[in-house]
Image (spheres, rainbow, N blue to C red):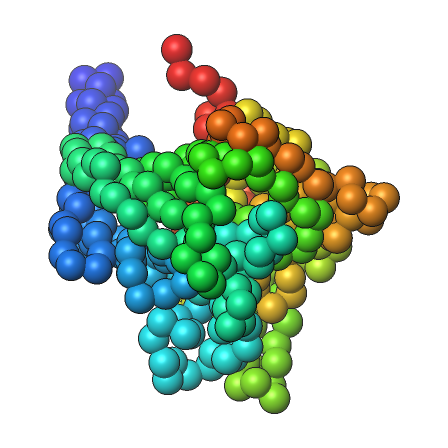
Amino acid sequence: MQRMITFLTVCAVTLFGSVAAMPSRATAQTVTIKQSDDRLSVLIDGELFTEYILRGHSRPVLFPIIGPHGLSMTRSYPIKMGVPGESHDHVHQKPMFFAYGWVNGVNFFAEAADSGKTVHDKLLKVESGSERGLIQTTNNWITVDDKIVCTDTRTLSFQAVPGGRAIDWEITLHASHGELTFRDDKHGIMAIRTHPNLRLDNAPDAGVTTANGQAVNSEEVSGKAVFGKRAKWIDYWGKIDDKMVGIAIFDHPSNPRHPTWWMARGYGYVAADPFGAHAIGGEPPDTGDMTIPAGEAITFRYRFVFHEGDPKQAKIAEQYRQYATPSE
């Protein structure tokens, strides 16, 4: 009996020690933000997560975005040229950005000669932290002749989450220079262009031959059928360098017209579009139009989760519930 008790005690100690030695997937990780002339670099436990590039493009963008296993999660083009296996279509679809097609008749999504631009104005706050880092800025939405159409205040926060990393966007659009009208359109608003492996289809003529992605949304619609559907969240996942990883995008329940419509393409462009009711959702014409009276504002919140495994392994539905539930 004594030998049996001793054996069980050793097993218990060994098991407890093994569990204690395993790193918790929810362990907080220090987020450090370093500032340079044209960008802010975000590091998690000393490793680069992403850079928020303030200038040099038609709008502020995030690139690169490094996910689990040190893998780049987005297409590099056109920020970084010459990456094998990438298509060179849609030059305006930068790795991650916030923009919209038609605001007061000005196209702030395209990059044509007459398109508008979102120009960084002020850096309000930069905070590093033991669990989260934060960047807050103001921006001007301007026409080709430098007229300000509206302004925004945006807060981006960065953190480790179970099995991955996350970026939160909170962006308030101010009708600071008169009434704002968002026209029903398919271009925008909170967007990412995924790594080519996470595409749902290949494009050999464009050099893309490694796509193996899958997609699903919160309503259990999958594959290319996610296009134009309303959902609380959407996830694209697949193998990059033989590692299964994915990108989930959460639409916060406080957002106007939640759950949003999704401009979710087979070629890896994914965007939440609360103004696309007709353009992508098939609703009657102009259903997605929205007007913000002068002096008022509208706020949108989104989370991007860069995770290991497929959506079930990453417990994306559970992570969404935690995101959507106000903390007490």
Q: Residue at x 55, y 77 (%)?
A: 89
Name the one closer to the observer, 42 or 93: 93
- Report x, y in % for residue 85: 47, 81
> Residue at 56% of width from left, 52% of height from top?
100
**Residue furthest top in the image:** 328
Q: Is residue 144 above or below residue 90?
A: above
- Front one among 322 and 293: 293
Q: Residue 279, can we see it?
A: yes
Residue 298 position, x and y percent, is: 52, 31
Q: Is residue 320 above or below residue 272?
A: above
Say which quadrant the C terminus sits in: top left
User: Which of the 4 image quadrants contains residue 110?
Assistant: bottom right
Judge left or right: residue 39 versus residue 147: left
| 230 sits to left or right of 51 | right
Image coords of residue 199 (percent x, y): 57, 67
For the point 41% across and 40% down, the residue is 152
Q: Nearer the viewer, residue 299 or 129?
A: 299
Q: Nearer the viewer, residue 163 or 282?
A: 282
Drawn side of residue 8 relative to residue 177, left or right: left
Q: Quadrant of residue 243?
A: bottom left
Question: Where is residue 322 drawn, in percent x and y?
Answer: 46, 26
Q: Residue at x 53, y 71 (%)?
A: 112
User: In the rendered view, would you say 119 is above or below 157?
Assistant: below
